[in-house]
Structures are given as structure tokens and as C-alpha cells.
Amino acid sequence: MKEEKEMIILAIETSCDETSAAVVKNGKEILSNAISSQIELHAKFGGVVPEVASRKHVEKMNPIIDEALNAAGITFADLDGVAVTHGPGLIGALLVGVAEAKAIAFALDIPLIGVHHIEGHISANYIEHDLKPPFLCMVVSGGHTHLVEVKDYGSYRIIGRTRDDAVGEAYDKVARSIGLGYPGGPKMDLLAKTGNGKAINFPRTYLEQGSYDFSFSGIKSAVLNYLNQMKMKNEAINAADVAASFQEAVIEVITNKTMMAAKNLGMNKIALAGGVASNSRLREEMQRKAKENGYDLYYPSPIYCTDNAAMIGVAAYHDYKNGIHHDMSLNASSNIQFG
Ligand code: KG4
Ligand code: ZN
């Protein structure tokens, strides 16, 4: 049998505060995944400042592409395609990556593939696992909380989503309120390990019976109220207990809704995706419940959970195989439909 031609894709991701470029072979092998994080730059403002992010992407874009090509041991001439996140995300930040990808595709006369950021996060699961659709994916990031039925490559149905804050956003806000700084998620994860998750009974928001949707604004307010009350009573706050109790409440809802969806949809494979999929307690609880119900659980290594270009290259490969590619009219969009 004739071996299928290999496809080497240069992928670019600039939707938020990471400038990343990766070289991906045949949608699976990560030849390089260069990431320049802007976390320290934004930390002093307590969150991502869009204009600052865009400027930093402009500065880092070319060096990060050189780094990715060098690490992969290839040159522009070896590329068979260029992929880029075209949304959703910060518009100014996205535009930097999209303009760059278009220039490269035009100059080299190779296919241009625009990728939806959430599809990228989901596709990160294909890198290290032998996972194939259909499966259920719980996408938990700083901007999104989506429970997705992955029917096939490129075929998605969102069955639940947050009605207010994304889970990562709630983590970051609660972290700030207990003085952990930005980005709070990883710090909350660490601190919670030393706290008692049963110390404070924060609300679990399940919404209507049978709903797969989420809401995290209630628990965020409950934490702030608790902190205010303690302050008024002049009582000391145990930040580790607050972090652990917040986490228990949020993770209980996420894991229970995921199990309910897997059962109702008859899915036996569950994947986690997005920055919060790095969370050690979420992984542990999801694993425990998955095992209890006889489901297989998959999640990417932390480096492929947070924003990275490798996941975009993987998604782009499957999109391209499905006949999806774009012309020079591809535009960045802060809010594009998914599923
Ligand atoms: O996927 P991502 O890098 O960016 C978006 O697409 O939003 O996710 C970033 C989010 C941030 O809110 C960050 O605090 C959270 O993921 N995060 C975590 C952990 N690591 C990152 N949240 C909880 N526990 C973690 N270990
Ligand atoms: Zn992301």
C-alpha cells in the first residue's frame, strides 16, 4: 500500500496571552511547540490587558516562529500548510496571528487553515492518547465552559455551557479576592491541597433538573460575601480552606454534570480540555467518578491544556482532511460560533 503523503503544518496561536508556534506532523507528532507567555507582563495589572497583549504578540510572533521551525529542524520550504486560531479570543491579539498566517500561506502558496480555539483545546487530547471520536469533552478554560459531544473530527454539538462566568474566570476572581494574584487558577490548585474542602459550604449551582448548563457567578459572590462577613466579624480567614471549599463545590457540579451527560448520551469515553483541565483535584475527582461508572477518562499534559499552538496544528490537520481550508479573506473574530 502506498504510504500517505506526510503533512507538516506550522500552527499559530495568539488568541489571548500566549504567543505560540508549533510544527505538527500528520496531526499527531509534535515536532516543536514554542510558547512565549505574557503572564508576568499582565500580572502587575491583575489580568490580561488586551492592547498590551497585541503589542507583545507583534514583538514575539516572528521569533517564536523561527524558534518552532528551528526546534523542528525544518525550514519554511518544508511546510505543507499553515494553521491559525481565528477566534474566539481578544480581537487585536487574534489579528496578529491571522495576519502572520495569511502572509506565510500567500508567500509559500500553501493551504491556510483557520481553527476555532475550542476545537484546538479538544484536539489536544489526540496528541498523547489513542483517542478517536465519538466522545464527550468537558472544556474548562479561562474563557469557556462547554460540555461538548464530539461526534466526529470537526463535528461537535454543545450540550451545555456556562450562563455567566467561565470556570477559569471564577477561579481567577476568587484567587484575587484571597490575595493570590494573577493567574489564580494554578495557585488555587496548590493552596487547596493544604486546605479542608468541607470547611465552608459554598453553593452548588445545578440549575434546572437535567440541565447541562453551568453558572459560576453565584459561588463567586458567595465567596466574596463570606470574606466580607469574616472581615466584619474581625475573624481571620483561612485562605487554604476557602480555596479548597470553592474547588470542591465547583468540581462537584462539573463532574456530576459530565457523568450525567455521559450516561444519557451513552458515551463511554470522556475527555477534559482547556487550562482548568490541568487542575489536579478536577482530574482526580473526574477519574474517580469515571472509574466508578466504567468510563475511560482522557486529559492532555498541562502544557497542552493551557493555550498552545500544537493543539491548533492537530485540529487543523483533521479539518484539512475534511476539506476545510481558507482563502485570503479569512478574518479574526472575537466571537465565532462553535458546533
Ligand atoms: O485554556 P487557557 O490557557 O486559556 C483560555 O482559553 O481561556 O485557560 C486559562 C485558565 C485561567 O483561568 C487559569 O487560571 C486556569 O486556566 N488554570 C487553572 C489551572 N491551570 C490553569 N485553573 C485551576 N487549576 C489549575 N491548575
Ligand atoms: Zn484557551
Image: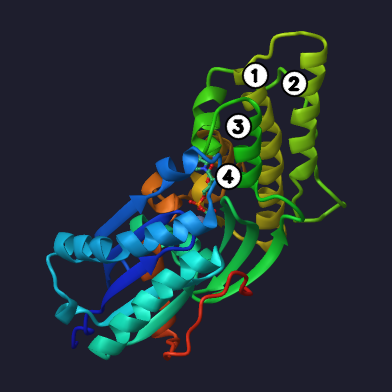
Mark 3, other Cα within 10 Å: few <14 / some 14–19 / many ≥20: many
Residue 147 against residue 155 in the figure, above or below: above
Give the spatial CA distance, label 1 vs label 3. Answer: 12 Å
Image quarter of the C terminus: bottom right
- Closer to viewer: mark 1 or mark 3: 3
Residue underneath mark 2: 200
Counting labels gives 4
| Residue type pointed to by label 4 | Ala
**Identity of the residue drawn at 80% across and 56% down:** 211
Horizontal and vertical percent position of residue 213:
76, 55
- Closer to viewer: mark 4 or mark 3: 3
The numbered disc on residue 175 is 3
- Closer to viewer: mark 4 or mark 2: 2
First in residue order: circle 2 vs circle 3:
3
The numbered disc on residue 241 is 1
First in residue order: circle 4 vs circle 1:
1
Camera-nearest residue between 73 and 90: 90
